[in-house]
Each structure stands twice: as C-alpha cells, then as structure tokens.
Image (cartoon, rainbow, N blue to C red):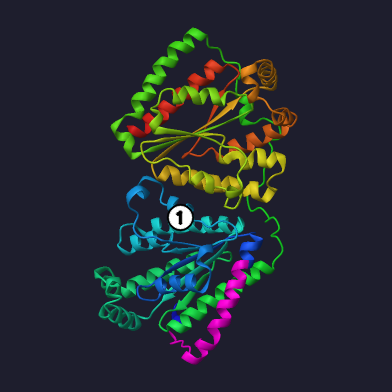
C-alpha cells in the first residue's frame, strides 16, 4: 500500500510559498470555530518511518495554528509511573477535550508494532492487540472524536539519504542513533509489518492517510490540507445523530426468570456472629494488603446496588481494614463539565490505582447501562454499545494484573422502603435520602430489568459479578469482605 507514497511527489518553492499563507489562515479559522462550537475534539496520530518528517510536522502544526488550543504528547517506551498502569492508561489521559486538538507523536500503534518487529510476540498476539485498537478507535469515533491517522513513509533509498543528512547536521545529529540505523538495516521487514498493521486497522471511522515524507513541502501541504478538509467537513455537519446499535438484541426469557430472581435476599446473621467474623476478615484483608506479592497487582473494587442497599456501609468495612495511604474511594455522581467533554470511560481510566493500591468505586462506569439507560440520559445505541466497551475495559485491567471485584448489593422493594423511611426519621442520616431516591423507586421495574441485562452481559471470566443478598446488612458486609479476600488470594497463589 506504500507504492503511491514512493512516486517522488514534489511541490515547487513557488507553489509552496503561494499556498501556505492561505492554508494557515484557513486552519486558524477552522481551529477557532472548533473552539467556539466545542462539539467535538480532534485527535491526530503521528506515526511512520524514521526520518520521514514526523517531528517536523508536529512542530509545524503548532506553528501554523494556535498552540494554546493544541495538546501535544510525545510517547516513547513505557517507563516510570506508566509501568504501574495498564498500557492504554497513558493514552486515555492524553485525549483532548471537546473544542481542542490533540496530537499524539507516537501512539498506541508504536508498542505493538515494535514489539512484533523485535519478535517478542507472535502474530496472533499482534492481531489481538490490533483488534483491541480497532475497538478503541471505533468507540472514540462513536463518542464524537474526529480521528486523523497519518503514516509518514519513505522509500529505502530515501530513508538512507535522510538519515545521513540528519546525522551530518550538528543541529539534528542527536535524532539519529543506533536504533534508527538498525531499523534501516531491517527496512524490508519493517515495511511488510507496517503494511499489515495499516491494512488491518484502516477502517471507515479511522482510515490511515499515508504521506510521502521525501519532499517536505509536499508533506507539509498534504497534512495541512487534509486536516483543514476534515475539520471543515465535520464543522459543517449537524449534530451527529445516535448511531444504530450493533449489539445483540436483549431477549427476555419466556418464563421471565432472570439471574437475580434466584437470590434469597433474607439471609440470617446475628450481630455477635457479625462482630466475630468482621474482626477475622478485616485482619485477613489487612494482611493481604501488605503481602509482598501485591506490589505486582492493583485492586479495583466496584460497588453497585439498589438505593439504600448498604454500599457505603460495606465500603467502610473494607476501608477499615486498610492503610489510608493505600486506597482511594471514588464516589461517582453525574459527570462534571470537564468529564462531559471527554469520552465516557475517560474519567474512570484517570482514577485507576497504581500497583499495590486500591481504588474503590461507589457506583461506577455501569451508570451508563443503569441510570443513564433508565432515565434517558443516553440513547439506546450508546448504552447498548457500552456493554462491549465495558467488557473491553475490564479485560484490559485484568490483562494488566489489576484485580477487579464487582459487587451488586440487592435488596427487595419492601426493605428499601423501610430504609428510606428510617433515613428520613434519623437526623444524621437525612443526607442519605433525596427526592431522586424516591423518584428512582417509582421506576423499580425498569431498573430491575436494566440490572438483569447488565449482570448477564458484563459478568465475564475476567470480571464476574458477585451478587450480594443485602436485606441483612451484617450478612452483606461479611460476604463482601470474604469475596474481596478470596479474589486477592486467588491472584497471589
């Protein structure tokens, strides 16, 4: 697929000089319109061969446009703190907000390409990573991001000439080292690998644009004009309509029987038994939190459940066993303006714990398939595709040695009513009850259906749901603690 980029494309100095001023002005106008409407972000991926002009192009875009509205990130090998998180963590943190342009110099393609190039993984592993990238880019596009992917190419002879010239110039000598000459030596192998990657990941929502990097004037105008055209096309569009869902339909069982219906919510446990077991389990969890092998893992605990089901009480019993320096509780409410300017999962990626630490989510990313579904905050296409996106997210956590433990605390409608009334009657508990709680209670059947679908579609081997019978708070807290301990112990064996 690189033949068209090896035809010796050229732009004369005169043509270049004549076209650049108008192009720069038009790019600035489009950039300021993007900022003003702030309907979508722009994400530009810069990848390609050594010496093909990647760095010069990044600098040029910042020169031609307003750099205050551009977020530029250069990525090398994963190092330092980044090693303590899943591989995609650093890219999620770099995503631009609506109205801004983000440039990733080196992107999520670099690591799988160079790992395969060095023969550190097999072809099947590479294709698995590429499939993961395709799903990510599809999700970003459906979230509204304008994604532009540029691959800068040089023929073998042209690359040798470029590297030689860079090495001879004192100002650019630092850019050429053993790594670059090694890549040239294995040019044919790398070219074949790059073709495989680009062909597999050039999709309708995120196509690759291959740029001939031999003539810098041609290269600059190609990138500038493509960016301008893409911006103008998107800015001219009306607000995007909801996408049609590609998920499997939700089929209710003919007899109406669902997973949660098998739960016996009224479990018995006396206060004395509870007190005795609480001390034992908290001691067990505390010892696990200091286990030498835990530094290879991080722990994500997800607490979902009916309103007043006891999530807060269960969380407090977990944190009561932990060093406060080693955990963070994230109460998840409606997204802020900054969070609404980003893809849905962005705010959760940013809250992941480093190794040896706990992140505890009091409600979580499941809001999209629960409250947003039931209350109509997300259209059907968005909450339906969220199931697979959430499964992908949790699989990535699992693959990165994150221990994910998910709880659904279930109570029946009568127990919920008793707890609501008790909260209203107890002064120091009134903050726990709001008009929204009563309003949500009126939609009990709709929420129950949403919970059934959530459990059935997102209980995976990597992150199964643990269903907690919570009419008895003592029983629920003990079950939560025991399950946390068992989940950690299973990974430390």
For the image, the number of numbered tags is: 1
Which residue is under mark 1?
A: 91
Q: Is residue 209 above or below residue 270?
A: below
**Relative to the observer, which residue lies in front, 334 or 385?**
334
Q: Residue at x 52, y 90 (%)?
A: 15
Q: Which residues, given as a range, are shown in magenta?
A: 6-32
Front in this rendered view, residue 477 or 313: 313
Q: Position of residue 452 (x, y in %)?
A: 63, 34
- The residue positioned 55% from the left and 82% from the top of the image is 21
Image x and y of residue 154, in percent: 39, 79
Relative side of 363 to 250, left or right? left
- The residue nearer to you, when weighing 2 against 346, is 346
Left/right of residue 328 with respect to residue 335 in the rendered view: left
Is 22 within the magenta? yes
Decide whether residue 4 is among the magenta residues.
no
* Quarter occupied by residue 172: bottom left
- The kind of secondary structure the magenta stretch mainly shows is helix
Q: Is residue 374 above or below residue 12?
A: above
The answer, for residue 284, to whether it is visible in the render is yes
Residue at 70 percent across and 20 percent down: it is 417
Picture coordinates of residue 219 (x, y %)?
Answer: 46, 80
């Amino acid at each position: 697929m690189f033949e068209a980029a090896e035809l010796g494309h050229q732009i004369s100095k005169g043509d270049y000089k004549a076209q650049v001023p108008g192009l720069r002005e038009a790019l600035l106008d489009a950039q300021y319109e993007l900022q003003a409407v702030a309907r979508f972000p722009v994400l530009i991926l810069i990848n390609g061969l050594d010496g093909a002009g990647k760095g010069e192009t990044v600098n040029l875009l910042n020169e031609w446009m307003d750099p205050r509205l551009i977020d530029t990130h250069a990525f090398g090998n994963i190092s330092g703190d980044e090693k303590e998180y899943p591989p995609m963590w650093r890219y999620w943190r770099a995503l631009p907000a609506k109205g801004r342009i983000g440039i990733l110099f080196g992107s999520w393609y670099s690591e799988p390409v160079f790992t395969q190039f060095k023969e550190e993984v097999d072809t099947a592993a590479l294709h698995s990573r590429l499939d993961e990238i395709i799903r990510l880019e599809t999700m970003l596009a459906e979230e509204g991001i304008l994604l532009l992917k540029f691959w800068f190419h040089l023929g073998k002879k042209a690359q040798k000439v470029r590297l030689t010239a860079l090495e001879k110039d004192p100002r650019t000598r630092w850019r050429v080292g053993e790594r670059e000459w090694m890549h040239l030596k294995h040019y044919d192998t790398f070219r074949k690998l790059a073709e495989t990657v680009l062909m597999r990941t050039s999709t309708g929502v995120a196509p690759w644009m291959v740029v001939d990097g031999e003539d810098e004037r041609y290269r600059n105008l190609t990138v500038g004009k493509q960016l301008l055209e893409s911006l103008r096309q998107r800015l001219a569009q009306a607000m995007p309509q909801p996408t049609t869902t590609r998920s499997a339909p939700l089929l209710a069982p003919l007899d109406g029987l669902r997973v949660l219906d098998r739960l016996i919510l009224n479990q018995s446990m006396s206060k004395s038994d509870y007190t005795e077991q609480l001390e034992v389990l908290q001691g067990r969890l505390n010892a696990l939190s200091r286990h030498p092998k835990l530094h290879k893992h991080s722990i994500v605990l997800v607490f979902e459940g009916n309103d007043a089901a006891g999530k807060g009480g269960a969380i407090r019993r977990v944190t009561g066993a932990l060093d406060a320096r080693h955990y963070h509780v994230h109460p998840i409410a409606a997204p802020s303006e900054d969070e609404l300017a980003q893809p849905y999962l962005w705010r959760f990626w940013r809250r992941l714990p480093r190794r040896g630490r706990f992140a505890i989510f009091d409600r979580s990313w499941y809001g999209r398939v629960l409250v947003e579904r039931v209350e109509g905050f997300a259209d059907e296409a968005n909450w339906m595709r969220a199931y697979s996106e959430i499964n992908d997210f949790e699989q990535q956590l699992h693959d990165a040695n994150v221990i994910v433990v998910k709880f659904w605390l279930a109570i029946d409608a009568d127990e919920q009513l008793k707890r609501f009334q008790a909260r209203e009657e107890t002064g120091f508990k009134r903050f726990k009850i709001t008009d929204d709680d009563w309003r949500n209670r009126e939609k009990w059947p709709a929420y129950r259906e949403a919970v059934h679908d959530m459990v059935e579609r997102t209980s995976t081997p990597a992150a199964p749901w643990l269903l907690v019978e919570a009419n008895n708070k003592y029983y629920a807290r003990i079950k939560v603690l025991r399950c946390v301990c068992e989940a950690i112990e299973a990974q430390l064996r």
